[in-house]
Amino acid sequence: MDDSPQADDDITWASLSGWDKAVAAFGMIGLAFGVGTALLAVLLLVLLAVAAASFRLVEADGTGTLFWGVALLLPCNVLAALFTCPLRWGIRLTALATRTKKVAEAVLSMVTTFLAVLFTVHVTPGLRVHRPWLPALLTALLVALANVGTRAMEKRAGKRAP
């Protein structure tokens, strides 16, 4: 153990040796890949759950189509957010009650997810969906349910923390 008076908070990037900087850089790259892999795995699980729940509506040429859908979901989500972003700004600038603003933000989040799934369904190669609004609605509801569950768990953890 090092009993030096220097605290861990006082370490700066400039004070690290070349080896420490390399290890830190590799650690951050590994963390980014790990977070990205976990995010893609969750997206793939949601996609598989929606495809399984609406198996008569969704036809895919193979498993590669599902990976294409996951890869295209992020750009389609950005495109959908471009459509709903002015509405979000408008809601934030209004003099509505805080609770009303939160509900409106939640609804816009569901609309963004719904649009993102619709865009993804239409641009994914090898994917045919007969009534695309049904899987899109199911996905939006699943994401909303996940958000509600996450908030409930955060509140419970906040109550337990001293």
Image (spheres, rainbow, N blue to C red):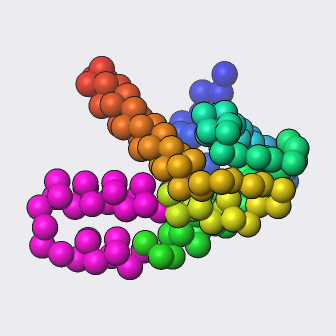
State the image quarter where residue 39 is shown: top right
Taking the image as shown, residue 18 lies to the left or right of residue 58, namely: right
Image quarter of the N terminus: top right
Q: Residue at x 13, y 67 (%)?
A: 96
Instruction: Return the x and y of residue 90 as percentages of the image width and height.
Output: 28, 77
Instruction: Return the x and y of residue 10 as percentages of the image width and height.
Output: 55, 49
Taking the image as shown, residue 38 lies to the left or right of residue 90, namely: right
State the image quarter where residue 63 is shown: top right
Q: Residue at x 50, y 44 (%)?
A: 138
Q: Nearer the viewer, residue 87 or 49?
A: 49
Q: Which residues are magenta?
A: 85-113
Secondary structure, magenta segment, majority class: helix
Instruction: Return the x and y of residue 107 as percentages of the image width and height.
Output: 34, 57
With respect to residue 101, does 135 lie above or below? above
Q: Nearer the viewer, residue 130 or 93?
A: 130
The answer to if 107 sits in the magenta stretch is yes
The answer to if 128 sits in the magenta stretch is no
Q: Residue at x 47, y 62 (%)?
A: 112
Is any atom of residue 28 visible in this view? Answer: no
State the image quarter where residue 95 is shown: bottom left
Instruction: Return the x and y of residue 93 as percentages of the image width and height.
Output: 23, 77
